[in-house]
Image (tube, helix red, strand yellow):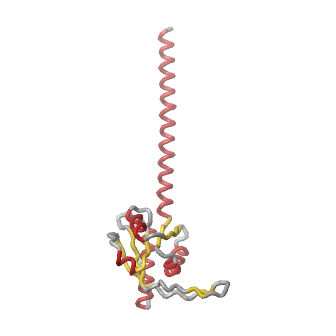
């Protein structure tokens, strides 16, 4: 009789152990799926920051083109202090930073960058009839990114910006694809 009770107790421990291991496996699998989804979602979005929101108007046609060609890419825009933006791009919290050449020349940054020419923006008239002109806009924008962080979508945006620069500066579109 004691042997029978011992066998039932051992069987109960094994069943309970199997149940615990099964739940742990399900938990681990669910976490792996969540991590993979987060990774996929983070690579679908491009975070672009600038010191002056008017700089986004200069690259809006390029971003519109990228959005139409790659509808899965989501753009997030922000603006802020150039020093803070450069810190955030170094940490990988921002993908691309747009700065005026004058501002970029005064800052020390060690990430990858190139400069693009931008077309002067047309003057805008508000509903009240007021003329809005961006007197602060120059003809060169410095594009900065962290090359240590890999992102295919970010690289697509950067190559489109470079192609737009070639179109504006040299008058033709040259695609490397």
Residue placed farthest to the bottom in the image? 171
Q: Nearer the viewer, residue 105 or 121?
A: 105
Q: Residue 117's quadrant in the figure?
A: bottom left
Q: What residue is drawn where x is 35% and y is 78%?
A: 105
Q: Residue 164's quadrant in the figure?
A: bottom left
Q: What residue is drawn where x is 42% and y is 64%?
A: 88
Residue 53, percent across and down?
A: 51, 75
Q: What residue is drawn where x is 47% and y is 43%?
A: 28
Residue 156, percent across and down?
A: 44, 73
Location of the C terminus (image quadrant):
bottom left
Residue placed farthest to the top in the image? 1
Q: What residue is drawn where x is 54% and y is 77%?
A: 64
Q: Nearer the viewer, residue 78 or 1?
A: 78
Residue placed farthest to the right in the image? 128
- Is residue 84 found left or right of 129 in the rendered image? left
Relative to 81, say whether 125 is above or below.
below
- Is residue 104 found left or right of 49 in the rendered image? left
In this rendering, the count of numbered labels is 0
Q: Residue 171's quadrant in the figure?
A: bottom left
Q: Nearer the viewer, residue 123 or 170?
A: 123
Residue 95, percent across and down?
A: 44, 67
Q: Nearer the viewer, residue 114 or 79?
A: 79
């Amino acid at each position: 009789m004691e042997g029978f009770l011992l066998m039932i107790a051992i069987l109960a421990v094994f069943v309970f152990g199997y149940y615990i291991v099964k739940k742990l496996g399900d938990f681990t699998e669910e976490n792996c799926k969540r991590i993979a989804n987060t990774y996929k979602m983070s690579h679908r979005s491009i975070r672009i920051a600038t010191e002056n929101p008017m700089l986004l108007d200069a690259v809006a046609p390029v971003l519109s083109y990228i959005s139409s060609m790659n509808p899965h890419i989501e753009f997030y825009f922000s603006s802020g202090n150039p020093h803070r933006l450069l810190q955030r791009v170094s940490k990988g919290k921002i993908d691309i930073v747009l700065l005026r050449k004058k501002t970029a020349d005064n800052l020390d940054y060690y990430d990858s960058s190139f400069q693009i020419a931008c077309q002067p923006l047309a003057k805008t008239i508000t509903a009240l009839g007021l003329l809005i002109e961006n007197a602060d806009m120059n003809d060169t924008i410095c594009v900065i990114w962290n090359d240590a962080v890999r992102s295919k979508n970010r690289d697509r945006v950067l190559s489109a910006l470079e192609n737009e620069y070639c179109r504006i500066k040299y008058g033709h579109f040259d695609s490397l694809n």
